[in-house]
């Protein structure tokens, strides 16, 4: 049997690689998707081979991740439960897509992921796999083996001589990509407990951020970011640049309790520095370029779009349908946004566009010749007609 394992070198997948090899007597191929986790990739191939893999793929997916996944999602202003910018969620369909492609290329019998039976990632990986290859066999060790906790995994790793970057003293789980890093589990499972001071990776704690604000500009073309500070960059370059700038000002830290697709609540701590800047900047450029009714309808789609991404339906027809509407709404969402970063805050200071719908001659509070204020009386009375009819029937008492 040949199995392609989604491998990160972390606690879970390090044990999984060895466990699959022994349990299924399998030829195991490791696959690591480089989605911008940076230093976590150092020595990864050597570690996979020494743990029992016969081959290790490390694919640089950063450009594809930013261009085909992050940016289309940000066109939709997708945000889950009003807080989460979907950093982990959006990476899973990309990883699963390449997992299936490698399985095809290698003639593998199955794919394997390290998501737990309690989490969302198992759903995201498998929905993608089945959408792209309906007959694929999926191995999910957390749903099969007898380990009950990460403490059990740490003990297994020690007994098999597998080095892992987790200890019993620091047992929370981390997942990083170029959009964000997440922290879950362990000492974070008490929602009243403050995250440890040393938890941050992508952002500086506020007491270490500069005492002077920093101004930057982000430029968009049809809702897609194309420049930072008037410098044209590839999609992955924009993400990395904004992560660096926003990270040093402590922008993008989130501590939330969210509702998982599988039914439970979960506390997560996230850092999304560049993504936070992009989200704020994108809404700012939309404010002067997007028609009011188009914006109203699009904003009504945000919760559904975010739910689809969070739940793992990236390759589902309903997400594609929504994406087509989102793409249409982004025509002429083009221009520049100036922002100020300071002590964890990201503040819009200006926006401009060649397609701006903002007309100062109409909006002015000074004297003008293009807006007859007396017209507002009829407008108000027409909009009040149904309310006046209702009040005449029900009376003034609304209790």
Image (tube, rainbow, N blue to C red):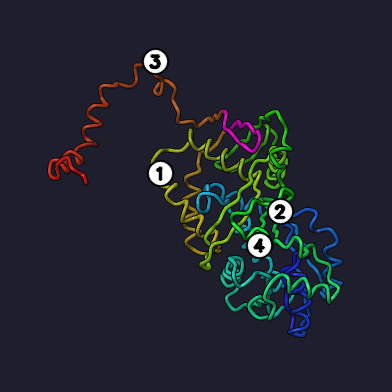
Residue 52: give x, y in percent of width and height.
83, 76
Q: Earlier in the sequence, mark 3 or mark 4?
A: 4
Q: Earlier in the sequence, mark 4 or mark 2?
A: 2
Helix, strand or loop for disc 3: loop
CA gap between label 4 and label 2 equals 27 Å
Does the CB distance between marks 4 and 1 fall below 8 Å?
no
Does the CB distance between marks 3 and 4 fall below 8 Å?
no
CA gap between label 3 and label 2 equals 50 Å
Residue at x-position 42% and y-position 49%:
300
Return the mark for residue 326: none
Residue at x-position 66% and y-position 70%:
100
Dot 4: within a 10 Å radius of its alpha carbon, few (fewer than 14), some, or many (20 or more) residues? some
210 up-or-down from 184: above or below:
above
Dot 3: within a 10 Å radius of its alpha carbon, few (fewer than 14), some, or many (20 or more) residues? few
Q: Name the residue under label 4.
A: 185
107 up-or-down from 47: above or below:
below
Return the mark for residue 62: 2
CA gap between label 1 and label 3 equals 29 Å
Q: Is residue 307 magenta?
A: no
Helix, strand or loop for disc 1: helix
The answer to whether residue 156 is seen in the rendering is: yes
Q: Which of marks 4 and 1 is nearer the N terminus?
A: 4
Mark 4 or mark 2, whichever is nearer to me: 4
Return the mark for residue 366: 3
Return the mark for residue 296: 1
Helix, strand or loop for disc 4: loop
Q: Does the magenta stretch include residue 338?
A: yes
Residue at x-position 68% and y-position 74%:
112
């Amino acid at each position: 049997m040949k199995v392609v394992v989604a491998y990160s070198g972390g606690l879970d997948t390090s044990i999984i690689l060895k466990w699959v090899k022994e349990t299924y007597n399998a030829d195991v191929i490791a696959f690591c998707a480089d989605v911008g986790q940076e230093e976590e990739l150092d020595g990864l191939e050597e570690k996979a081979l020494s743990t029992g893999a016969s081959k290790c793929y490390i694919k640089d997916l950063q450009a594809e991740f930013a261009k085909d996944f992050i940016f289309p999602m940000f066109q939709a202003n997708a945000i889950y439960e009003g807080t989460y910018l979907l950093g982990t969620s959006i990476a899973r369909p990309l990883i699963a897509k390449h997992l299936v492609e490698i399985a095809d290329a290698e003639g593998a019998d199955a794919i394997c992921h390290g998501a737990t039976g309690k989490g969302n990632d198992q759903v995201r990986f498998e929905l993608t796999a089945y959408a792209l290859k309906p007959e694929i066999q999926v191995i999910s060790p957390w749903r099969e083996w007898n380990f009950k906790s990460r403490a059990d995994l740490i003990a297994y790793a020690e007994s098999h001589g597998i080095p892992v970057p987790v200890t019993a003293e620091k047992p929370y789980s981390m997942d990083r990509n170029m959009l964000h890093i997440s922290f879950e589990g362990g000492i974070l499972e008490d929602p009243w407990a403050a995250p440890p001071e040393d938890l941050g990776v992508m952002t500086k704690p506020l007491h270490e951020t500069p005492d002077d604000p920093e101004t930057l500009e982000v430029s968009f073309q049809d809702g897609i970011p194309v420049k930072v500070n008037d410098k044209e960059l590839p999609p992955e370059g924009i993400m990395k640049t904004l992560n660096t700038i926003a990270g040093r000002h402590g922008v993008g830290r989130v501590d939330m309790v969210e509702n998982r697709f599988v039914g439970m609540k979960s506390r997560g701590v996230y850092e999304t520095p560049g993504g936070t800047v992009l989200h704020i900047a994108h809404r700012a450029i939309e404010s002067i370029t997007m028609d009011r009714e188009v914006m109203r309808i699009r904003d009504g789609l945000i919760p559904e779009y975010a739910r689809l991404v969070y739940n793992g339906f990236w390759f589902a027809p309903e997400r594609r349908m929504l994406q087509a509407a989102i793409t249409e709404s982004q025509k002429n969402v083009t221009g520049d946004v100036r922002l100020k970063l300071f002590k964890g805050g990201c503040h819009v200071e200006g926006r401009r566009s060649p397609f701006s719908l903002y007309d100062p001659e109409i909006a002015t509070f000074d004297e003008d010749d293009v807006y007859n204020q007396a017209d507002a009386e009829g407008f108000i009375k027409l909009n009040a007609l149904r309310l006046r009819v209702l009040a005449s029937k029900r009376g003034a008492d609304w209790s």
